[in-house]
Image (spheres, rainbow, N blue to C red):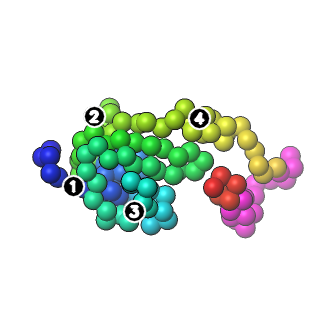
């Protein structure tokens, strides 16, 4: 694409498959989980080449360098042409540990959690991993 092109951050994160949907990318921006140049950005913030983008997808804080810009969703094989993952190895280990760490214990045979219990569990997990 052209050198002076700028793209909305929510659209860019969706197009390079950091988020599954554009609305989830926008929501992450609104919640302050996307940072560019040490500033929390709105979904409409324009990004440019060579900027560093920090995305907090708890418990991991991902760091990406923008190589090229795109507005259209690309295949997973082409993502490496648009962003470079510079996330430290310590952060990636947190993702593996999340699956092994159980912060909520349920008695065996107690059945599936109710809707209310599930919401409580989700709130506990969100608080724990922030």
Q: Which of 46 and 39 is in front in this view?
A: 39
- Residue at 73% over, 41% down: 101
> Which numbered mark, 1 or 2, is in the foreground of this view?
1
Residue hosting label 2? 81
- Residue at 39% over, 62% down: 41
> Which numbered mark, 2 or 4, is in the foreground of this view?
4
> What is the number of the mark on residue 122?
none
Say whether residue 22 is left or right of residue 110. left
- Residues in magenta, as a range: 106-124
- Residue at 62% over, 39% down: 94
Residue hosting label 3? 41
> Which numbered mark, 3 or 2, is in the foreground of this view?
3
Residue hosting label 1? 6
Q: Which of disc 3 and disc 1 is earlier in sequence?
A: 1
Q: How far apart are marks 3 and 4 (CA)?
A: 25 Å
Are the residues at dot 1 and dot 3 in contact (C-beta closer than 8 Å)?
no
Are the residues at dot 1 and dot 4 in contact (C-beta closer than 8 Å)?
no
């Amino acid at each position: 694409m052209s050198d002076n092109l700028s793209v909305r951050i929510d659209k860019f994160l969706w197009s390079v498959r950091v988020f599954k949907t554009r609305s989830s990318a926008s929501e992450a921006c609104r919640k302050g989980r996307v940072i560019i140049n040490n500033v929390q950005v709105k979904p409409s913030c324009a990004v440019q080449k060579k900027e560093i983008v920090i995305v907090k997808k708890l418990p991991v804080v991902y760091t990406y360098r923008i190589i090229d810009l795109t507005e259209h969703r690309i295949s997973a094989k082409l993502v490496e042409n648009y962003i470079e993952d510079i996330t430290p190895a310590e952060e990636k280990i947190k993702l593996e540990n999340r699956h092994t760490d159980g912060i909520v214990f349920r008695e065996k045979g107690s059945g599936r959690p109710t809707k209310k219990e599930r919401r409580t569990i989700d709130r506990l997990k969100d608080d724990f991993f922030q």
